[in-house]
Amino acid sequence: MSSRAFAPFINPVVRQFEAYVPGRSIAEIREAYGVSRVIKLASNENPLGVSPAVREVLRQQADLVFRYPQSGNPRLVKSIAEFHHVDPARVFVSNGSDELLDLLFRVCAEPGVHNVVTALPCFGIYTTQARFAGVELRQAPLRPDFSVDLDAMLALTDENTTLVFLTSPDNPSGLAVPKEKMLRFAESLPKQCMLVADQAYVDFAREEDGGEDAFSLIPELEAHPNIAVVRTFSKSRGLAGLRLGYGILPADLVSYLWRVRLPFSVNLLAEEAGIAAMKDVAFWRETVRVVEQGRRQLEQGLQELGCNVVPSHANFISFCRPGMENAGGINEELLKQGVIARWLKSYGLPGYMRVSVGTEEENTVFLGALKAALAAC
Ligand SMILES: Cc1ncc(COP(=O)(O)O)c(C=O)c1O
């Protein structure tokens, strides 16, 4: 009998992939640096944690997890449709918005034929899932102030471009494109091309600039059939760990997405939690208020420490120390003090760090740790 180990066939595209490197966990940092208190401000999670209404629903539903969820998650779809005043036929729900983004590459582009346009740098999922789908991704560099260069994006489109991904507010800059500009951009796209507005952070848009109303494209979808909006429950709704995202998209596209989505990718607890989170308007509003306040606290604190701050419409802030090309040392010094923020090296911005807006206390601890880190570097 042969002693040769079985080597399964691996798709050559997959052979090129490196495993996703997630942010480091609280437990890992506690152990590695011997610190008792660790605060995590690296993944733009909800500063208030879990909504009490969601916690209660999860407790009640625990006995039902031996059941499959209802196919197509119709109650969740209905609650999202009601919240946004849209036709339920336009609503699609997914295992985190990541799943929807992935499906869009595979449903709306044919490998080797079509291309997709986005910005550089962009949210990492666009790059990995485009590669996995075998779809060419064309990227227009952001301007030096991190604003999106819509003209450059438009110039990259051609008769084979089927999707343009625009993240607004953007990650990691936090900058947002005003609604009118997005609409004009969508109107200028080639006729077969759909604008996908990834608006994961739009409910945090700055009040002084008009808040969510000035940036959300959902109310504009009826009049602009070539726009789709992607949203998530991971940020302002506090469900990152349950994995729940959604899109408001053209109804015919939604019907195709349902055909290929794995039947139960939105699990029973995520579904029930999502319905409860949509109803818990008080928790959602309080989250937005705490983020507005915390963002001001962080912006002011960072500026007082001599940092350059990118003005953010999201629940995070990117910043750098002027003249410092590599923030790796600052990142390390923060970790030693039990503060996990995000070093933006993987976005091609090694001089920059991104910090999520936490509670007032977490923000204060972060600013104190950063002060010490800057002094040490
Ligand atoms: C711009 C953007 N889009 C989408 C996502 C994915 O969110 P989720 O898969 O948790 O819904 C994130 C997560 O951080 C993000 O920053």
Image (cartoon, helix red, strand yellow):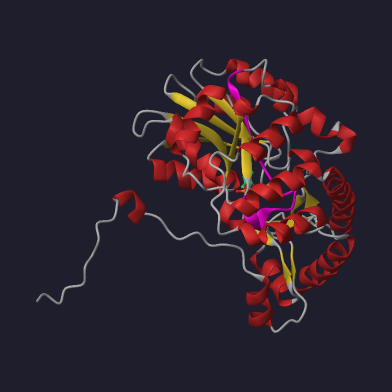
- For the residue pair 318 and 265, the one nearer the viewer reads as 265
- For the residue pair 23 and 228, the one nearer the viewer reads as 228
Looking at this view, name the residue that lies furthest to the bottom: 34
Q: Is residue 326 visible?
A: no
Q: Percent x, y for residue 245?
A: 63, 43
Depicted 237 relative to depicted 65: above or below: above
Q: Is residue 49 visible?
A: yes
The tally of labels here is 0
- For the residue pair 4 and 365, the one nearer the viewer reads as 4
Q: Which residues are magenta?
A: 225-243
Depicted 113 relative to depicted 200: above or below: above
Depicted 21 relative to depicted 71: above or below: below
Query: Residue shown at 81%/72% (left/top)?
Result: 372
Q: Percent x, y for residue 21?
A: 53, 62
Q: Quadrant of the N terminus?
A: bottom left
Asked if the stretch drawn in magenta spans residue 242, the answer is yes
Asked if the stretch drawn in magenta spans residue 326, the answer is no
Depicted 57 relative to depicted 333: above or below: above
Query: Residue shown at 62%/39% (left/top)?
Result: 246
- For the residue pair 227 and 169, the one nearer the viewer reads as 227
Q: Percent x, y for residue 248?
A: 63, 30
Q: Quadrant of the C terminus?
A: bottom right
Q: Percent x, y for residue 70?
A: 56, 44
